[in-house]
Image (cartoon, rainbow, N blue to C red):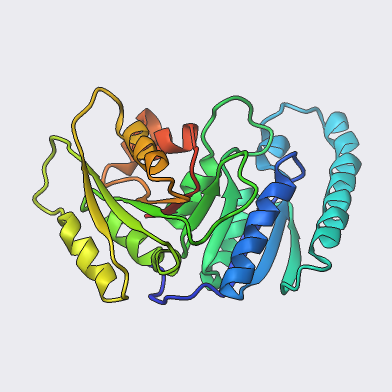
Amino acid sequence: MYWRECDEMKSILFNAFSDEGHSKRLDVALDLARNFDASLTVVSVVPYEVLIGDGLSDAAFAAMIPIWREEARELREQTEQDLANEGVSWRWIESSSPATDAILEHSPLADLIIIGARDPRRGGRVPSHTAGDLAILADCPVLVLPEAQSRFDITAPALVAWDGSPEASHALKSAVPFLKESSEVFFASVKEKKDARFDLPPVSGADYLSRYGIRSEIVEIAESSKDVATQLTDAALARRCGLIVMGAYGRMRLAERIFGGVTRSMLTDLQVPLLLRH
C-alpha cells in the first residue's frame, strides 16, 4: 500500500487524548490545516491498553466506564471550544477500538496523520507503538510530535534522513508538500558499513525534488561513536530544522521492532517533529 502521489494535503487525521499535551498538539494540527487549507478529523479513542492490559476485575472495569465517558465528554467540549473560532473545517469521531485500528479505519482517504510521541498512559521514555504501527500500515505519512511541541513553522528548514532505501524514497515522496514550503532542505546521509546494492545515492533524491522546484543540499555525516538517531537529531538541531523526514523501519523491520533500530531510537527521544513513511 503506497500513498497516492500528490503535492497537497487536504485531509488531516488528528489523534486526540486527554493529557497535558493535547492542546499543544491540536495547535500544531491547526497550523498545518490552515497552511494546507485542509479539513481536520479528530479521532478520540479509549486507550486499548486500558481495556486489556491493566488487569482490572469486571467490577473495576465497569466502574471505570463512566469515568472514561466523562473524560471523553470533557475532551470533546474542550476541543470544540478550541476549534470554535479557528476557521478550520473539522469533525469529531469517537471510538473504543485500539488507537491504531481506529485511525487506520479513516486513513485511506487521509493525507496526513498527526499523533504524539508517547502512547497514552505509558510512562517514561517508551516509544510510541502506535506511531510505529501507523507508519507501517497507514495509507498516508505519519507526523509524530515531541511532547513539548506547541506550534509548527512550515517554513523552517527540513532534514531528510537518507539511506537510499525504498522506505526513504517513500518518505521523501510523502514529504513533498512540506518540503515545498521549507526554506532549506538537507539530505543527511550517515556513513555506515552495509550492503548498498539496492540503495539510491542522495543525489537521486535531490534530483527528484528538483522536479518539484525544490532545491536541496546534501550533507554527509561522518562515522561517529554516536548512534544514527542521535547523529540525525544533532544534524537537524544544528541546522535549526523544524522537521525530520525518515523512512520507517527497514527491510528487517520485524527485527527492528523487537531489538531496536533507528526508527525506535528516534521515537524514544524525539526532539524534532518526525514525518514517517514505510
Residue 227, quarter of the rendered image: top left
| Residue 1 seen in the figure | no
Between 144 and 218, the one nearer to me in the picture: 218
Residue 135 vertical position relative to residue 5 in the rendered view, above or below: above
The x, y position of residue 69, in whole percent, is 87, 48
Q: Residue furthest left?
A: 197
Residue drawn 37% across and 35% down?
A: 234
- Left or right: where does residue 102 sit relative to residue 58? left
The x, y position of residue 54, in whole percent, is 71, 28
The x, y position of residue 37, in whole percent, is 61, 76
Residue drawn 43% across and 48% down?
A: 241
Between 200 and 152, the one nearer to me in the picture: 152
Residue 232, quarter of the rendered image: top left
- Left or right: where does residue 99 sit relative to residue 176? right
Q: Quadrant of the C terminus?
A: bottom left
Residue drawn 34% across and 40% down?
A: 235
Q: Quadrant of the N terminus?
A: bottom left
Q: How many marks?
A: 0
Between 212 and 162, the one nearer to me in the picture: 212
The x, y position of residue 236, in whole percent, is 38, 43
| Residue 51 seen in the figure | yes
Residue drawn 45% across and 64% down?
A: 178
- Left or right: where does residue 268 sit relative to residue 193? right
